[in-house]
Amino acid sequence: MNLGLGLSLPSRSGPIVIPPDPGGGVPTPPAGYTLLKFPDGSYVTTPEGNYLAAPV
């Protein structure tokens, strides 16, 4: 499935990459996904500054 936002959800088998919110804040993941966090509460991000979300 393509959401038209540069995000592709071929299957709900693993994490997806979500770009940051346009205002610089934390993005809202698509329905059925949750943002991944480290034990200290900080979000898991890529070197490019994108967030990772996993199916719930």
Image (cartoon, rainbow, N blue to C red):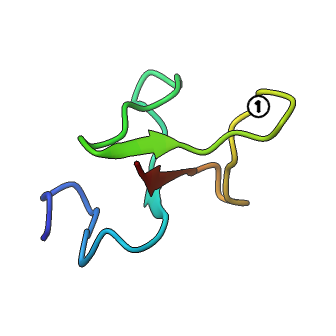
Q: What residue is disc 1 on?
A: 42
Numbered disc 1: secondary structure: loop
- Kindly identify the amino acid type of the residue bearing the numbered disc 1: Ser
| Residue 38 left/right relative to 10 | right
Find the residue positioned furthest to the bottom: 10
Q: Is residue 2 above or below residue 43?
A: below
Quarter of the picture holding the N terminus: bottom left
Q: Is residue 33 above or below residue 46?
A: above
| Residue 27 left/right relative to 35 | left
Q: Of 47 and 43, which appears nearest the observer?
A: 43
Residue 45 x, y percent position in the rendering: 67, 50
Residue 28 lies in what quarter of the image?
top left
| Residue 48 left/right relative to 39 | left
| Residue 31 left/right relative to 17 | left
Find the residue positioned furthest to the front: 56
Residue 2 x, y percent position in the rendering: 14, 67
Q: Residue at x 76, y 31 (%)?
A: 42
Q: Residue at x 65, y 58 (%)?
A: 48
Q: Residue at x 31, y 68 (%)?
A: 12
Q: Residues within 10 Å of mark 1 (few under 14, many from 20)?
A: few
Residue 32 x, y percent position in the rendering: 28, 45
Q: Is residue 17 above or below residue 36?
A: below
